[in-house]
Amino acid sequence: MKRLRRLLLLTLALFVSPAVLGQQLTVAAASSLRPTLDYLVDAYEAQNPGHQVEIIYGSSGRLMAQIINGAPFDVFMSADMAFPQNLFDEGEATSTPVVYGLGRIVLWSAHLNAADMTLTDLADNSIRRIAIAQPSVAPYGQRAQEAMTAAGVWDAVQPRLVFAENISQVAQMSESGAADIGLIALSLAIQPGLVERGYHLIDAALHQPLEQGFVITQRAADNAQASSFSAFLQSETARDIFYDNGFDVPGKPAAEQ
């Protein structure tokens, strides 16, 4: 019986077209896109029955390194443009990097009233632990450092900084009490479970723009679904989802300071 079942499965596989067998798509995505990308994938799969998208979240720098080292990712959605541009320049991406939105940074805390705070308040030594993403691998961490430097508090806060590998971990540290406050993505701060605590939106003029972009990797050069998903990310439906989840999108009003 088992032999017969294996023969039936093998026979079925021979009649399934390569296009159907290749419907799986793997997307490597910056942690700031959680859960925005989950909503995007739901909308994409609803429009494209039979297509399946798997998401791997992490810090942009580490995901880029994994792609260079052969990780099986088809699309890379970064928290800035430098990493996808680097992949393209190195021949590791088959499409020109495309901006899908601009990220914003906020102060958020489960234990303090961050809505009534500004960056200058971080100099107060009563705030013992301040969480940010690791600047060397996470664009949100880089921009957090730039913003605190511009606000004149970077030197004062350095002894009290705690670092996370990505921006989702910063939110987790701030929520759990491992940090008193964190500099996290607006796209995370407005989600249920966090938005109820309020937040302070950091002035975008205090740091370089957080232009976030994506590329199709060289591995997916002939992957029709990668092209389909790329087109969807540039559609009006996707733009609305990005905007509704805290990203500034060209042609739509920017988040208010």
Image (cartoon, helix red, strand yellow):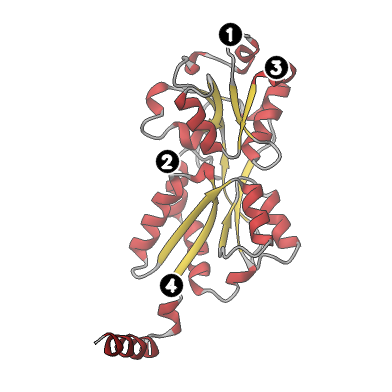
Mark 1 → mark 3, Cα distance in angstroms: 14 Å
Going from the N terminus, do you reach mark 2 or mark 3 first? 3
User: In this figure, which residue is indicated by the disc labeled 3?
Assistant: 153
Q: Secondary structure at mark 4?
A: loop
Q: In this rendering, is residue 23 above or below 99? A: below
User: In this figure, which residue is indicated by the disc labeled 1?
Assistant: 126
The three-letter code of the residue at mark 3 reads: Val
Compared across the picture, whether 237 is left or right of 132 comes to left
Q: Quadrant of the C terminus?
A: top right
Q: Secondary structure at mark 1?
A: loop
| Image quadrant in which you'd find residue 156 | top right
Q: Are there few (<14), some (14-19), or many (20+) residues within 10 Å of tag 3?
A: some
The three-letter code of the residue at mark 2 reads: Asp
Is mark 2 in CB contact (under 8 Å) with mark 4?
A: no
Please tell me which residue lies in front, 2 or 134.
2
- The circle drawn on residue 235 is none
The three-letter code of the residue at mark 1 reads: Ser
Q: Quadrant of the N terminus?
A: bottom left
Going from the N terminus, do you reach mark 1 or mark 2 first? 1
Q: Are there few (<14), some (14-19), or many (20+) residues within 10 Å of tag 2?
A: some
- The circle drawn on residue 244 is 2
Mark 4 → mark 1, Cα distance in angstroms: 53 Å
- The circle drawn on residue 23 is 4
| Image quadrant in which you'd find residue 93 | bottom right
Q: Position of residue 186 (x, y in %)?
A: 50, 33
